[in-house]
Amino acid sequence: MNRTRGLFWAAACTVAFAGTALAHHGWTGYTEELQKLSGTIEQSSYANPHGSLQLKTADKTWEVVLAPPSRMTNRGLTEAMLKVGTTATVEGYRSKSDEKELRAERISVAGKTVELR
């Protein structure tokens, strides 16, 4: 009986964690048309599961989804490069459900372009 209960809970946890991972990493909620935005960083986060920034453009402020911090660091994009007041250009895909969200493929900041995906 205890073995059956243990197997049940192991299977339940596996399904729950797999569902969470798929929901977080799914990109089907974004358009297929690449969009380029330029503006000023108003806020940034260099934290897991992925970094983000608020980019103020001429018409609105965008919530930009970046890569995980380890990937950004490995590719040369440091937290210091994303400081408030810095000008940045981001290329990525707009969210289908949130008109102010963009999933970034690359970012150009401080004279450097970094591929994020």
Image (cartoon, grey):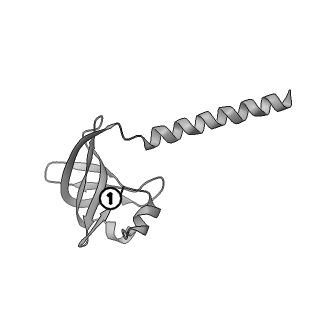
* Any part of residue 85 in sight: no
- Please, what secondary structure does the residue beneath circle 1 have? strand
Q: Which residue occupies 43% across, 68% down?
A: 74
Residue 43 position by quadrant: bottom left
Q: Which residue occupies 48% across, 55% down?
A: 48
* Location of the C terminus (image quadrant): bottom left
Q: Residue furthest right?
A: 1
84 left or right, relative to 48: left
Q: Position of residue 115 (x, y in %)?
A: 32, 61
28 left or right, relative to 13: left
24 left or right, relative to 30: right
Q: Which residue occupies 46% across, 37% down?
A: 23
Question: Closest to the observer: 66 or 54?
Answer: 66
Q: Which residue occupies 43% across, 62% down?
A: 71
User: Dot 1, how many residues are within 10 Å of its Cα: few (below 14), some (14-19), or many (20+)?
Assistant: some
In the rendered image, the vertical position of residue 104 relative to residue 8, given as above or below = below
Q: Position of residue 33 (x, y in %)?
A: 21, 43
* Location of the N terminus (image quadrant): top right
Q: Position of residue 80 (x, y in %)?
A: 36, 71
Residue 91 position by quadrant: bottom left
In the rendered image, the vertical position of residue 80 relative to residue 105, given as above or below = below
Residue 18 position by quadrant: top right
Q: Position of residue 22 (x, y in %)?
A: 48, 39
Question: Closest to the observer: 63 or 25?
Answer: 25
Give the residue number, with chain letter if any, for mark 1.
43
Q: Residue furthest left?
A: 58
User: Which amino acid lies under the numbered mark 1 shown in the image of this protein?
Assistant: Gln
Question: Closest to the observer: 54 or 65?
Answer: 65
In the rendered image, the vertical position of residue 16 relative to residue 69, given as above or below = above
57 left or right, relative to 101: left
* Any part of residue 7 in sight: yes
